[in-house]
Every structure is written in structure tokens, then in C-alpha cells.
Amino acid sequence: MSVIRLLVLGAVRQHGRAHGYQVRNDLEYWGAHEWSNAKPGSIYHALKQMAKQGLLRAHETAPSTAGGPPRTEYEITERGTEEYFALLRESLTAYDQKPDVLSAGLGFMVDLPRAEVLALLEERVRAIRAWRAAVTEHYTPAEGPGRLGHIGEIMEFWVHSADTGADWTLRLVERIRGGAYTFAGEGEPFVGVLGEGEENPYATGERHAGDLG
């Protein structure tokens, strides 16, 4: 699954219209450059590619009164919205992906109704348990990894990961079922983007040619 597509589509959607540097700034504010491949080059490339694919609509803006160069602002299209929600749903159920997939999904889960998020997370738990059952057809955790030599540590890691993944997901389900967070259709959502001119305390400060585009 393309995490960068989910992150960029979600960031643009939250603004309504946003230029590339705003998207980059938001993703750095969320720390996405630390836990995903959301680096400046990837972000600007994704914006241009998705505009070509009809997922985003590009708007050329006039130069600023201060004499700065014109920038391209992006707006999510109907096709882009469909793609965004498909990626979001996949991120919440996929158990066999890198951690950045789930991290991105958690960042946008409130864009879905509460009941749907609960159903998706419960599906995630079922998938994890099915995967664990497949592993334990060939490996018995109670016997320990030593019976298979050091290779047994691989299966031990898989089983432990499945157990902790299911436990964490179930605790999240409990919190959401108990009323945590504001989901789609429930009222004003949590604002997780920077306002115009608001300083980003987590910005990397790394310059990129796309910052001016």
C-alpha cells in the first residue's frame, strides 16, 4: 500500500486547498518524516503524479504581493476522495504491512464514522488471529523457540507480534467504543494541521527545490 499517497491526499483534504509546502509542513508536524517515507521529494512527486492521475486538481496561483513566485495549490477531486477512503480503510485492517501503514491510518481514522472504524479494527484483530493460528500450526509457543534452533526465534517473534498487535488493537477498540475522539458526523473534528503562518516546532529545516513550487 502507498503510505505517501494516503498521507498527501489526507493532508490536502484537511486544508481544502493546499500548496506543496503546506502539505510538507503538516506531515513534518505529525512526524511522518520519521516513521514513513514522507520526505520532501516524495511529497512533491506524489502531488504532481496524483494531479496527472486526476486524484488532485492543480490551481496556479498569482505571485504574492511581496514578490514571491507563484505556487501551485492542490485540491482533492471526487476520484481522489474515493482513493483516499479506500487507502484509509485498507490501512486500518491490514496487519501484514509496515508500521507506517497503520500509523497513517490512525492519523486519519476520525474521517470515518465511529461504527465503521470499530468494524475495521475488529476485522484487523480477526486477521491477526488467523495469521497467528497459521504460524502455530507449525510452531508451539509453549515449547519455546529452542526446539527449532535459533530459527525458532523467528516464529517466536511472529507470535509475540501477533499477540501484542491484537492486544493493542482491542484496547483501542475499547477506547473508541467508550466515546474517545470525535469521528465523522459527530461534531467539530480535532484540528491537526498548522494554521497559516503558524510556526512548526518539528520542521526539519531542510531546504528542497519543491518548496517554492
Image (tube, grey):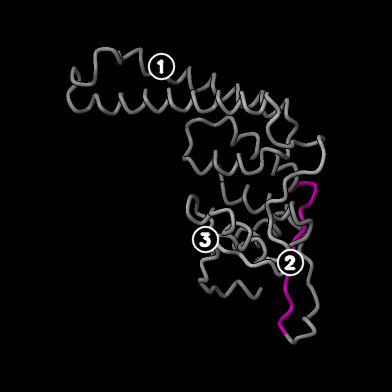
Q: Is residue 182 visible?
A: yes
- Identify residue for label 1: 134
Q: Is residue 54 visible?
A: no
Magenta residues span 68-79
| Amino acid identity at mark 1 | Ala
- Can you tell which mark lies on residue 196? 2
Label 2 vs label 3, nearer the camera: 2
Q: Which residue is mark 3?
A: 39
Circle 2 or circle 1, nearest the eye = 2
Report the amino acid beneath label 2.
Answer: Glu
Upstream in sequence: badge 3 or badge 1: 3
Q: Residue 140 in magenta?
A: no
When the figure is inspected, residue 161 is found, relative to residue 108, above or below; the finding is above
Quadrant housing residue 175: top right
Q: Quadrant of residue 153 in the image? A: top left
Closest to the observer, 116 or 45: 116
Q: Residue placed at 77% from the left, 81% from the top?
A: 63
> What residue type is disc 3 on?
Lys
Q: Secondary structure at mark 2?
A: loop
Secondary structure type for disc 3: loop
Of marks 2 and 3, which one's residue comes earlier in the chain? 3
> x%, y% of residue 65?
80, 84
